[in-house]
Image (cartoon, grey):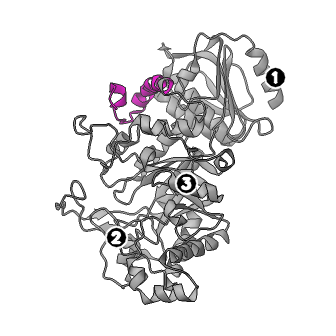
Amino acid sequence: MKRILLVVFAIICTTVVYAVDYANVIVPRPVSCEAVEGNFALTPKTVVRAESLSLVRAGEIFAEDLEVVLGKTLIVKKSSPRTNAINLSVDATTLESEQYMLKITNVGVWIVGGSERAVFFGLQSLLQIAAASPLSNDTLTLAAVTIADKPHFEYRGSMLDVCRHIFAVEDVKRYIDILALHKINKFHWHLTEDQGWRIEIKQYPELSHVGAYRHQTIVGRNRHSKVYDNTYYGGIFTQEEVKEIVAYAAERYIDVIPEIEMPGHAVAALTTYPYLGCSGGPYEVWTRWGISKNIFCAGKDTTFEFIENVLTEVLELFPYKYIHIGGDEAPRDEWKKCPHCQKRIKDEGLKDEHQLQSYFMERIERWLNERGRSIIGWDEILQGGISKSATVMSWRGSKGGIAAAKLGNHVIMAPNTHCYIDYYQTSDHKANGEPLGNGRFPVTLRKTYDLDPYVGLNEEQQKFIKGVQVNLWTEYISTFDHLQHMLLPRLAALAETGWSYGNKDYSDFSRRMHILRKLYDKQGFNYAPYFFNGIE
């Protein structure tokens, strides 16, 4: 049946005209789009027909999203393909895992993917086409088109920090909705920090009561302010809530990668259980931002017992193969003074505290590897040496990623120069009335779009670049409206690099973004207006 469908598609779409260029509609830009003669009338009577029950759910999500465009909800059912319908099917033999074909003809719509995930991607493209199409008397007129599409990079991610400020479960789900629209397939969820521990661990219940809360929060710019809000702040995601969010993401074919920070950014854990630190405390959950010198003690076996017990519960909640274990911004001051850490250095034959961190990370990596998991770490894990199996997330520019790729390690490019979307997004944030943000330097939409993940690498080394990611830290972001303002439209620029690398054109992207904006409006997203108003 699948091969017959592909033959039918070829016959239906033999007459090619170029009245409509659908490459100027879809973000990220498809590999190939060809306008063909005719159009399809999508009405409330149109049925979404899926070949399997799991594709029925993908169709239902599409129908829910389409309702804001059409004004009505379509019926979705398990059925063989028919005309006057949106037909969903999988052909894993002919197509690659994330590759799809989308054909709009006079008599119906067909989406065939190499997997169910690929079909879902095709539905996101169809949603964007529908939002750009004329609506009259409950009828969307979709111009006929043939699209063949697949992503360039396997990893296309977005990180959300819920530690500096926590967000409701429904907000996290809405964040996932935004990722899905842009064909982002990885959700990196930053769950532990100096300012708050955000995941329930049943073996350590006090994390939910002590580590999850701070007594107050700094107001204004961290480096200059001495003002605090005097408000007790915090919260926790219960394990049931985590399961709910992971399942919600899975329905949208997004893998969730938890981050449990170590050995630094651990003050919330140390406050709860002071024996985990070198000095034994006392500690206090941080009320301002920055880098604490108080980190996990690498000399005590009880530290590793705690981390392994935490990870045991984390593995039960997150089925995806990767666990992010941090590794960034971990000052070694306490280790230099700690007799336990110095004994560990001597006993293990290590050269210095840099190698002690490598010992720390590789010990946890071996433990995870034994359980079928792999690690991701920030680029600081390169200091002192890393195993060949560790994946490096390059954030301090691209230099760490370049070094890791040259060593033969897999790399995710997320340089702060292009991908830190908590940074201001215009060249003059004061004049443009931007809300408080990170002020190191502006990361404009164009800057994010211009990311080249392969810079500095030859063809062989480029094979180690798994993909790209934007990071959204929330020191200055306390509401979901503000979060969306920072996320959009810059997420779209990253999505196009991840999906369409080698097929990018900023002027063309700009035109398509003005079209995609209509869907943002219909969805009620609180995107930043600067780019759309001609400001960067």
The quarter of the picture where residue 253 lies is top right
Checking the image for residue 250, the label placed there is none
Q: CA distance from mark 2 to mark 1?
A: 62 Å
| Residue 473 falls left or right of residue 392 | left
Secondary structure beneath dot 3 equals helix
Tag 1 residue: 7
Three-letter amino acid code at the position of disc 3: Gly
Residue 227 in sight from this viewpoint:
yes
Mark 3 nearby-residue class (10 Å; few <14, some 14–19, many ≥20) = many
In the rendered image, residue 231, in percent from the top left (x then y), is placed at 21, 62
Q: CA distance from mark 2 to mark 3?
A: 25 Å
Is residue 501 found inside the magenta-colored segment of the image? Answer: no
Three-letter amino acid code at the position of disc 2: Ser
Checking the image for residue 292, the label placed there is 2
Secondary structure beneath dot 1 equals helix
Badge nearest the viewer, 2 or 1: 2
Q: Residue at x 58, y 85 (%)?
A: 348
Q: Residue at x 25, y 68 (%)?
A: 215
